[in-house]
């Protein structure tokens, strides 16, 4: 904290601090001083404090895992950062950014890979996406292939413990062009009946899974909310 004097101190996962550490943090915030290791006199410090957490601090206070007095020091103002599943429009940017970090040898990314990523809930958010994209890209690089949907691990972006649905390659529009495009309500009803299982819904609608996924993306249907319902 002494190093943050005159600047900003950022505490990540503040809800995970042990209660004794929370007490020490509160004391610093209230007195504006710290006692360096081995010192006998406190030293004045002045800094901005910014903290982040995935947990609801109010729930943590109620459960006795977070000090109420510290919450009133840190709890407001608060900024909520939506999970990745609520801002899918950013997904393409994060994929491209991860690939750029691999340098000029990074494999070209196909539309099928992006589509496969769009259909996952990504509970680990951007960190999980970057990790899985990097792993898939490195595998594609060793095989000297483009980054296809099949390179994405079946469990990537899925809730822990969920059964992953096999990911298939994107087929050309000509393969399923003979089937008429169903109405949006019909697609949603099929997904409801199958609890978000794209393969079963595609079979019921007489479409390929790839074509159904394109319709899901076009209409921004929240398939993830149906799984396990």
Image: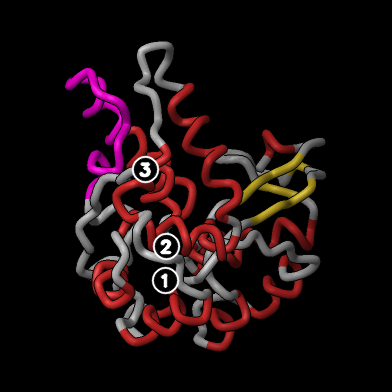
Where 76 sits versus 167, above or below? below
Q: Secondary structure at mark 3?
A: helix
Label pair 2/1, CB-CB below 8 angstroms = yes
Any part of residue 123 in sight: no
SS type, badge 2: loop
In the picture, the disc for residue 103 is: none
Please provide percent x and percent y for residue 207: 31, 65
Relative placement, left or right, of 22 versus 153 is right
* Mark toward the start of the polypeptide (2 vs 1): 2
Rounded to the nearest angstrom, the CA distance separating label 3 from label 1 is: 18 Å
Whether residue 149 is in magenta: the answer is yes
Find disc 2 in the rendering and name its residue.
121
For the residues labelled 3 and 2, the Cα–Cα distance comes to 17 Å
Residue at (75% x, 74% y) in the render: 72
Q: How is the image coloured?
A: secondary structure
Query: In the image as oriented, which residue stretches furthest toward the top?
Result: 104
Please tell me how crowded label 2 is: few (under 14), some (14-19), or many (20+) other residues with Cα within 10 Å: many
The residue that appears at 39% across and 24% down in the rendered structure is 108
Which label sits on residue 224? 1
Residue at screen point 54% across, 79% down: 60
How far across and how far down the image is residue 87, in percent?
60, 57
**How far across and down, in percent of the image, does residue 136 sit?**
28, 35
């Amino acid at each position: 904290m002494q190093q943050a004097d005159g600047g900003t101190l950022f505490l990540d996962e503040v809800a995970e601090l042990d209660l004794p550490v929370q007490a020490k943090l509160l004391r610093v915030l209230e007195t504006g001083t710290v006692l360096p290791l081995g010192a006998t006199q406190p030293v004045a410090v002045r800094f901005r404090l910014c903290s982040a957490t995935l947990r609801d601090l109010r729930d943590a206070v109620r459960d006795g895992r977070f000090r109420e007095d510290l919450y009133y020091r840190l709890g407001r103002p608060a900024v909520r950062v939506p999970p990745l599943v609520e801002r899918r429009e950013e997904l393409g940017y994060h994929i491209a950014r991860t690939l750029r970090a691999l340098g000029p040898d990074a494999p070209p990314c196909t539309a099928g890979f992006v589509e496969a990523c769009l259909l996952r809930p990504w509970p680990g958010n951007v960190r999980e996406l970057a990790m899985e994209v990097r792993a898939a890209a490195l595998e594609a690089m060793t095989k000297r292939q483009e980054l296809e949907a099949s390179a994405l691990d079946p469990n990537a972006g899925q809730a822990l413990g969920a059964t992953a649905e096999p990911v298939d390659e994107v087929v050309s529009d000509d393969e399923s062009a003979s089937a008429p495009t169903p109405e949006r309500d019909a697609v949603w009803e099929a997904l409801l009946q199958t609890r978000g299982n794209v393969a079963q819904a595609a079979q019921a609608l007489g479409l390929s899974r790839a074509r159904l996924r394109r319709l899901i993306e076009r209409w921004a249907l929240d398939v993830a909310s149906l799984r396990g319902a």
